Image (cartoon, grey):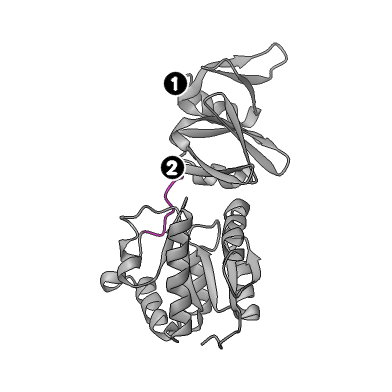
């Protein structure tokens, strides 16, 4: 139980920097809250939970390597603090969490939904109901009864949150034509506009539907149905021309796979 006047100690776990920053900004607007740490992967989350002993953790379900559910398995449900899941699963897939009284935030979430989840979690901590939450977490992990968890395989991204001048907007993945790397950032090109996010190309590649997107180069991912022509110059270098007229380089080790998709090789 959090003593009266003592700050609620919160840990943020998400592999997306923008998602962690959004949670930080929202929590800073809350009274009597201390953000004790952040983690960008499951292993770091396990260490932080064990060493920092937060009262509450916002835990991303889908992370490369050790997922949010893996974190709970490693820590043990009985030792977990109050937990709010953060996920890209849709509302219907997550009804199980709601039945189990484990709250969640579906990306991208609005301020009001965050307020509801945070208030619920704070109330649970203050009423010393973490033990009850542990039982429900255990049920989720075991996949029993109404608290069964959704499939462990992450859903592919359908939308990406982009922050511009302090505002967050959503870019539907269906509108993205291609993505390019720019240092630690990625640029989403959609409808003639570029949107910058702080995300690794590897992470984006893993979370985009491979039936629709293909990484043609270490610094470029394209939507396959936007490819108009495969190009080859006299020097042996390859590229693609998109419907928009944009031309992008193709790594030689990606050409064969791309040719198969285009039906150029058996």
Residue 117 in picture, x, y percent from top left: 44, 66
User: What residue would you read off at disc 1?
Assistant: 263
Q: Which quadrant of the figure has residue 234?
A: top right
Residue that lies at the very extreme toward the top in this rendered image: 234
Q: x, y (%) of residue 133?
A: 40, 79
Compared to residue 138, the image places residue 113 above or below, namely above
Q: CA distance from mark 1 to mark 2?
A: 27 Å
Secondary-structure class at tag 1: loop
Instruction: Specify the quadrant of the image occupied by residue 204.
Output: top right
99 and 219: which is toward the camera? 99
Q: Is residue 96 above or below residue 80?
A: above
**With 152 as the anchor, is 45 left or right in this view?**
right
Q: How many numbered callouts?
A: 2
In magenta stretch: residue 67? no
The answer to whether residue 42 shows anywhere in this view is no
Q: Which numbered disc flags the more N-terminal residue, 1 or 2?
A: 2
The magenta stretch is: 151-158
Label 2 neighbour load within 10 Å: few <14, some 14-19, many 20+? some
Neighbours of disc 1 within 10 Å: few (<14), some (14-19), many (20+): few
Residue at 55% over, 56% down: 64
Quadrant holding the C terminus: top left
**Residue toward you, 132 or 153:** 132
**Quadrant hosting residue 89:** bottom left
Residue at the image position 43 percent from the left and 85 percent from the top: 127
Dominant secondary structure of the residues highlighted in magenta in the image: loop
Circle 2 residue: 158
């Amino acid at each position: 139980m959090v003593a009266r006047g003592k700050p609620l100690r919160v840990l943020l776990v998400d592999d997306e920097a923008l998602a962690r920053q959004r949670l930080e900004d929202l929590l800073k607007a809350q009274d009597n809250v201390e953000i004790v740490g952040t983690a960008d992967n499951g292993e770091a989350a396990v260490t932080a939970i064990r060493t920092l002993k937060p009262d509450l953790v916002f835990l991303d379900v889908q992370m490369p390597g050790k997922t949010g559910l893996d974190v709970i398995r490693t820590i043990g449900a009985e030792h977990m603090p109050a937990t709010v899941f953060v996920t890209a699963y849709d509302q219907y897939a997550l009804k199980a969490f709601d039945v189990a009284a484990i709250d969640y935030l579906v990306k991208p979430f609005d301020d009001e939904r965050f307020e509801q989840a945070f208030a619920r979690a704070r109330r649970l901590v203050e009423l010393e109901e973490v033990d009850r939450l542990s039982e429900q977490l255990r049920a989720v992990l075991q996949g029993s009864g109404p608290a069964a968890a959704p499939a462990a395989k992450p859903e592919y991204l359908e939308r990406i949150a982009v922050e511009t001048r302090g505002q967050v907007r959503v870019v539907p993945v269906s509108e993205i034509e291609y993505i390019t790397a720019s240092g630690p950032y990625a640029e989403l090109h959609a409808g003639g506009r570029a949107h910058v996010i702080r995300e690794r190309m590897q992470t984006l590649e893993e979370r985009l539907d491979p039936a629709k997107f293909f990484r043609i180069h270490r610094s470029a991912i394209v939507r396959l149905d936007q490819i108009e022509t495969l190009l080859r110059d006299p020097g042996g270098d390859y590229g693609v021309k998109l419907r928009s007229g944009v031309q992008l380089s193709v790594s030689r080790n990606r050409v064969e796979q791309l040719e198969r998709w285009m039906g150029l090789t058996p």
